[in-house]
Image: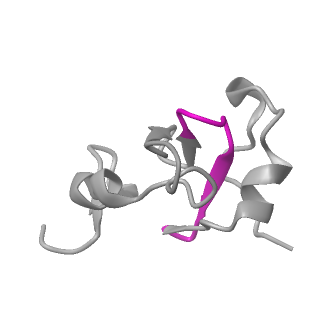
Amino acid sequence: MDGKISQNIFGEKMINKDLLEILRCPNCVKEKSGKLKLYQDSWLICTDCDRKYPIVEDIPVMLIKEGDKWKGTPKSDLPIPPPKPD
């Protein structure tokens, strides 16, 4: 698929790997790698600061304040699907 969203084997939408390669944590990108890992096709987790950014309606919510809300939450406790931001 050419778009930014593709589907997994269950027909669920997920982030395209090319997009995932260029997305970075907005808090860390200036001083560190800010690399993000996809978790459960619903969250992007920064490998540097552990901020967690939800993917809501197939759109990554890359706001630092949103990542801050989930920073101390173990990834196993993250809600799937993520709630909509305030």
Verify whether residue 57 appears in magenta.
yes
Q: In this rendered view, identify the residue nearer to me: 19 or 58.
A: 19
Question: Image point 68% across, 29% down: which residue?
Answer: 75
Q: Residue at x 79, y 44 (%)?
A: 70
Is 24 in front, or is 2? 24
Q: State the image coordinates of residue 62 (x, y, percent, origin top left).
A: 60, 65
Image height of 58 relative to 82, above or below: below
**Quarter holding residue 55:** bottom right
- Can residue 83 be seen? no
Which range is magenta? Answer: 46-58
Q: Residue furthest left?
A: 1
Residue 6 visible to the viewer: yes
Quarter of the image for residue 18 reads bottom left
Task: Verify whether residue 53 appears in magenta.
Answer: yes
Picture colour scheme: one colour
- 66 sits left or right of 62 in the view: right
The quadrant of the image that shows the C terminus is bottom right
Q: Position of residue 32 (x, y in %)?
A: 49, 42
Instruction: Count the labels in the image.
Output: 0
Q: The N terminus lies in which quarter of the figure? A: bottom left
Q: Residue 74: image x %, image y %?
A: 76, 26
**Compared to 40, does 12 lie above or below?**
below
Q: Is residue 33 left or right of residue 61?
A: left
Residue positioned 30% across, 61% down in the render: 19
Q: Residue at image x 78%, y 70%?
A: 85
| Image coordinates for residue 58, horizontal then vertical, percent | 48, 68
